[in-house]
Image: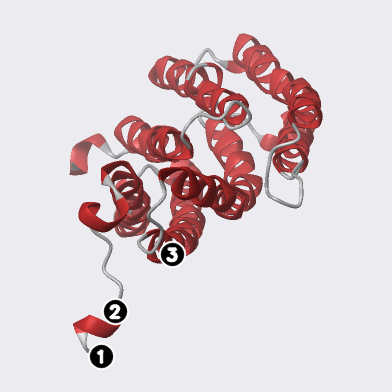
Amino acid sequence: MELSETFVPTAGTVGLLPMLTYYSLIVTGLVFLAQAAFVFTTRPLVEPKHQAAHILSGVIALVAGVAYFQMQDIYRDMLAELATVVDATDRQTLMREAYPAVSQYRYMDWAITTPLLLLTMVRLLNVSLRSIARPVALMLVADLFMIVTGYIGEQQLTFDQEAIVSAKLIWGAVSTLGYAVVPWTLYKLYRQYGAVPSLDRSFRLVALTTITFWGIYPIGYILSATGVDTNVIHIGFCIGDVINKTGVAALLFLTTHRRETV
C-alpha cells in the first residue's frame, strides 16, 4: 500500500497531547505482550508451587494486550477524522465523543484481568484456595460488581455522547461499594494467613496497589464527567494499568523464582 493512502498521525495534524495518548496506548499494549512472552518463557524458573500464579500473570497480560490494541485502533480512527477538523471546539467534541468507545474496551479488559489479579495476590498467601473459598468468592463477586456497575455508569450518555453527570456519579458511588469489599477481604486474609516470611512483604506490597494505584480509576471516572481533556484520563489509565499488571507480575517473579537458577 502506498504511504499516501495510509493515515499516519503526527502532532502537526492532530496535536501533541492526542499523539502522546496514541503513543501511550500502543506502548502499553506492547508492554503487555512483552510481559506475556516473559512470563511464559520463564515459567521453569519459578518455584513449582507458584507457577499457577505466574501463568495467571501471563494470561492477564495477553488479555490486556489484546484490549489495548483494540483501543489504539479505535483511537487511530478518531485521529484520522480529527486531522480533518480545524475548529478547536469541534476537535474537543470529537475526542470527547470517542472516549466512551475507547473506554468500553477497558471495562471488558478489567472484567477479566482484575479477578485474575486478585487470584494472583491470594496465591501469594501460599494457602489452599479451597480453605478460603468463601471470602475469595465474595471478593471476586464484589470485584465484578464494581466493574459492571462502573461500566453502566460510563454508559450514562446522551445521544450526543454528553455524560449524564448525576446518573454517572450515582453509578460510580454504587460501584465503590464493590471496591470497598476488595481491600477489606485482602486485609482479613492477610491477618489470618500472611505469616509466611518470604511472601509476607510481597503480599502487603501487592495488596497495597488495590488501595493506592487502583485509586487512579475512580479519579479518572469522576474527571470524565467534569470536562477534563479525555487524553489526560487515557494516559493516566495507561500508567495505572502498567503498574497494576506488569508491576504485580514483576514482583511475583522476583519473589517466587528459584534462587539457585537465577
Q: Are marks 2 and 1 in contact (CB under 8 Å)?
A: yes
What is the x, y in percent for residue 107?
A: 63, 46
> Which residue ends up furthest to the bottom in the rendered image?
1
Q: Which mark is residue 1?
A: 1
Secondary structure of residue under mark 2: loop
Quarter holding the N terminus is bottom left
Residue, x 46% and y 41% (percent of image)?
Answer: 50
The residue wearing badge 3 is 81
Q: Are marks 3 and 2 in contact (CB under 8 Å)?
A: no
Q: Amino acid at mark 2?
A: Thr
The residue wearing badge 2 is 6
* Comes first in the chain, label 2 or label 1: 1
Q: Nearer the viewer, residue 195 or 164?
A: 164
Q: Amino acid at mark 3?
A: Glu
What is the x, y in percent for residue 27?
A: 29, 51
Q: Nearer the viewer, residue 133 or 222?
A: 222
In 3D space, how far apart are the residues under numbered discs 3 and 2 (Cα atoms)?
13 Å
Residue, x 69% and y 40% (percent of image)?
Answer: 154
| Above or below, 46 relative to 65 | above
Q: Residues within 10 Å of mark 1 (few under 14, many from 20)?
A: few
In 3D space, how far apart are the residues under numbered discs 2 and 1 (Cα atoms)?
8 Å
Secondary structure of residue under mark 3: helix
| Above or below, 177 relative to 90 | above
Secondary structure of residue under mark 1: loop
Q: Amino acid at mark 1?
A: Met
